Amino acid sequence: MQTRPLGASGIEASVIGLGTWVTGGGAVWGTEPDDRESIRAIQASLDAGVNLIDTAPGYGWGRSEQVVGQAIKGRRDSVIIATKCGLIWDDDRGSPFAELNGKMVRRSLRPDTIVEEIERSLTCLDTDTIDLYQTHWPSVEPDKTPIEETMAALLKLKDAGKIRMIGVCNCSLDELAENVQHGPVASHQFRYSMLWRDAEQEILPYGQQHHIATLTYMSLEQGLLTGKIGLDREFAQDEFRANEDWSPWFQLENRRRVLALLDRWEELTEKYHISLAQLALAWTVAQPGITHVLVGARNTQQAIENAAAAGVELSKADLERMNQDLETLGPPSGVS
């Protein structure tokens, strides 16, 4: 398994990390995961050399953290646990964010909610220390906490030994720079895939310049880039894939274009003896500024396949060909 540093922390993490959003379940995923199979998938990832596991309290209201905690019992010392703070749902503190599975989720990076969240996460994960503690989303009005105050709270947790590294997620360039100004930022987690490349303009160059690790999510576009979601697949209204703003490529005509592109890459999968999912992950790992790629797994087969993508090295010519094909594909169409 290939590893790269988590920023300037001196800690090496596998380039393919296990994301556990799907492990928490919920209506956005369409079908519920099986906790026992999720545990097997996590353990299979570890067996395959993955040492970075990313989770969050909001993934199933603690369910994902609990499953991760169960899966790594007896193996804690070999695992880098990344979890998050900043989304709460049990009172009216913070700023409204979204209604999810019948609960109003709020953004809060107040010191008082962070202190409460870290204790719940430590309990759910059954550990004394979180390796990488990340702010899930930036704080916003009307209950906006200054970044300086949030970072001060996180530094106190670091001094107390409750966390080892500080990370951020989903930041704009200005937000990322302000976080860096007030404390050591090991990593930045954000959405990035061959179909969603906004970060290449400013975020990735800044991260490279400041030695900030990148943890990308949705790099398989929720399964679309595996080629296994055909034109006949229909999605429930509350599924994430049905949301035109977040998942425009799942709209029928856009999906048709993506599937046609993937068909043209069949010769690449045959050349490297890999799946389309592995091809997409290998492409992502090879992009300038990308250090780590998070990908979910519902079962052991997916976990093993995803981990193996770390060993795929695409030639310069094939990377250039894929980039030319992606440029020809262009942006999604027909989305307001």
Image: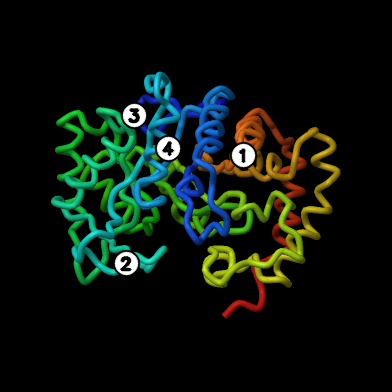
Spatial separation of the CA atoms under disc 3 and disc 4: 27 Å
Going from N to C along the chain, the mark reached first, 4 or 1, is 4
Q: Mark 3, mark 4: which one is toward the viewer?
A: 4
- Identify the residue under disc 1: 286
Going from N to C along the chain, the mark reached first, 3 or 4, is 3
**Figure quadrant of residue 248:** bottom right
Q: In which quarter of the image is the N terminus?
A: top right
In the rendered structure, which amino acid carries the disc numbered 3?
Ser
Helix or strand or loop: what does disc 2 sit on? Answer: strand
Q: Mark 1, mark 2: which one is toward the viewer?
A: 2
Tag of residue 104: 2
Spatial separation of the CA atoms under disc 1 and disc 2: 38 Å
- Crowd band around label 2 with a 10 angstrom C-alpha radius: few (<14), some (14–19), many (20+): some
**Figure quadrant of residue 83:** top left
**Up/down of 139 relative to 13, above or below:** below
Spatial separation of the CA atoms under disc 2 and disc 4: 23 Å
Counting from the top left corner in percent of width and height, residue 71 is at 45, 29
Going from N to C along the chain, the mark reached first, 2 or 4, is 4
In the rendered structure, which amino acid carries the disc numbered 4?
Val
Helix or strand or loop: what does disc 3 sit on? Answer: loop
Q: Residue at x 31, y 52 (%)?
A: 177
